[in-house]
């Protein structure tokens, strides 16, 4: 496995998780202030955040969060992104192995 590519994939995952979480949180807080119902966009953002936060959300609950310090919470989020980075690397390598290279396609 390419460790550098795993870290790039993990960083991209972390950025996507942070961006969607921020958008979802701000959208829901605005809705909370005026009491309006959730829109399809709000629901979609929440679903994306839940998908990107998996598998971390399986282990995360209020009792665990209260017992952990802030540093442990950030480590858990980082570990989640690292797991995603590894999985994306595996998928990337499988895709590269099954797809013929440009040189192979040119020779046909």
Image (cartoon, rainbow, N blue to C red):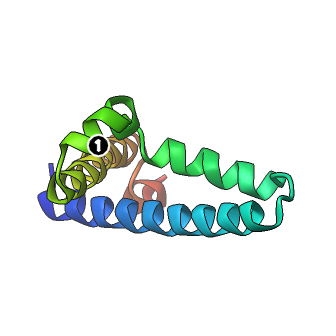
Residue at 29% from the left image edge and 49% from the top image edge: 89
Residue 50 visible in this rendered orientation of the protein: yes
Residue 58 horizontal/vertical position (percent):
38, 30
Viewer-nearest residue: 18 or 30: 30
Viewer-nearest residue: 19 or 36: 36
Task: Examine the image and state in which quarter residue 97 appears.
Answer: top left
Q: Is residue 62 above or below residue 20?
A: above
Q: Residues within 10 Å of mark 1 (few under 14, many from 20)?
A: few
- The answer to whether residue 3 is left or right of residue 34 is left
* Image label count: 1
Residue annotated with mark 1:
65
Viewer-nearest residue: 103 or 7: 7
Residue 55 visible in this rendered orientation of the protein: no
Residue 16 horizontal/vertical position (percent):
46, 64
- View extreme (top): residue: 58
Residue at 30% from the left image edge and 53% from the top image edge: 81
- The answer to whether residue 28 is left or right of residue 61 is right
Q: Secondary structure at mark 1?
A: helix
Residue at 30% from the left image edge and 33% from the top image edge: 63
């Amino acid at each position: 496995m390419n460790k550098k590519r795993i870290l790039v994939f993990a960083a991209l995952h972390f950025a996507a998780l942070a961006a969607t979480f921020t958008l979802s949180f701000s959208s829901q807080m605005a809705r909370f202030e005026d009491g309006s119902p959730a829109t399809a966009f709000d629901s979609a953002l929440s679903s994306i955040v839940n998908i990107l936060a998996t598998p971390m959300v399986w282990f995360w609950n209020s009792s665990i969060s209260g017992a952990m310090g802030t540093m442990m919470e950030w480590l858990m989020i980082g570990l989640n992104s690292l797991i995603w980075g590894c999985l994306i690397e595996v998928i990337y390598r499988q895709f590269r192995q099954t797809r013929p290279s440009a040189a192979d396609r040119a020779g046909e």
